[in-house]
Amino acid sequence: MQKNNINSIVMNKILFSLAVIISLGITACNNNGNNNNNTKEPLQAKADTLYNELIKEHNEGMSGWMKIEDMKKKISDIIDSITALPLKDMSYVEAYKTRLAGATEELTNAYNKMDAWMSTMNLDSSLDNLELRIKYLSEEKQRASEITALVNNSLQKADSLLKVEF
């Protein structure tokens, strides 16, 4: 009987040890899965934030972009009106027309850059690779910021020229 008790005790210890090892293995596997998720979640959050910032920048740029053609028409109308005026001192008027033409060129440049950027932008880029997606979205956000500034600056310059009185 003593032998059976010893065998039973040894068997219980072995089973207990196996249970502990299996439990540790399951816990380790679960933790590894959580580590991947924990690593992935900050990257996904960063990608989502960059995406939202890019869309915000795009929308701001688009807001100005949609005003450019109207602004160019206003400048063209003023240039046409100036050209039709019988003025004695045309030097001031010619300088103003030159500034208006320059503003029109800047507006056209801003319009074309926004248009070109929008046609090449791919919001679905690298959906399966968060690190590449973050890099892409960061670069596109920078481009969007530059183009938005170009659009806004050209509109502001044109607007200030339209307010000139003489």
Image (cartoon, rainbow, N blue to C red):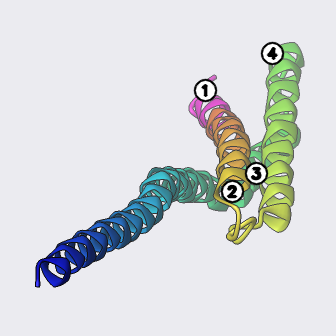
Q: Which residue is mark 2?
A: 133
State the SS at label 4.
helix
Look at 60% across and 34% down and name the residue there. 156
Q: Residue at x 50, y 55 (%)?
A: 56
Residue situated in front as seen by the camera: 73 or 16: 16
What amino acid is labelled 4 in the image?
Answer: Tyr
Circle nearer the viewer, 3 or 2: 2
In the picture, measured across the screen, residue 22 lies left or right of residue 126, that is left
Q: Earlier in the sequence, mark 1 or mark 4?
A: 4
Q: What range of the chain is rendered magenta?
A: 156-166
- Per the image, label 2 sits on a secondary structure element best described as helix
Mark 2 vs mark 4, foreground winner is: 2
Residue indicated by mark 3: 72
**Side of 94 where 159 appears, left or right:** left
The mark that comes first in sequence, 3 or 4, is 3
Q: CA distance from mark 3 to mark 1?
A: 16 Å
Going from N to C along the chain, the mark reached first, 3 or 1, is 3
- Of badges 3 and 1, nearer the viewer stands 3
Q: Quadrant of residue 30?
A: bottom left
- Viewport quadrant of the N terminus: bottom left
Q: Is residue 46 above or below residue 156?
A: below
| Secondary structure of residue under mark 3 | helix
Q: CA distance from mark 1 to mark 2?
A: 47 Å
Q: Position of residue 100 (x, y in %)?
A: 80, 33
Q: Is residue 161 magenta?
A: yes
Q: Amino acid at mark 1?
A: Val
Nearer the observer, 164 or 138: 138
Point 69% across, 67% down: residue: 123
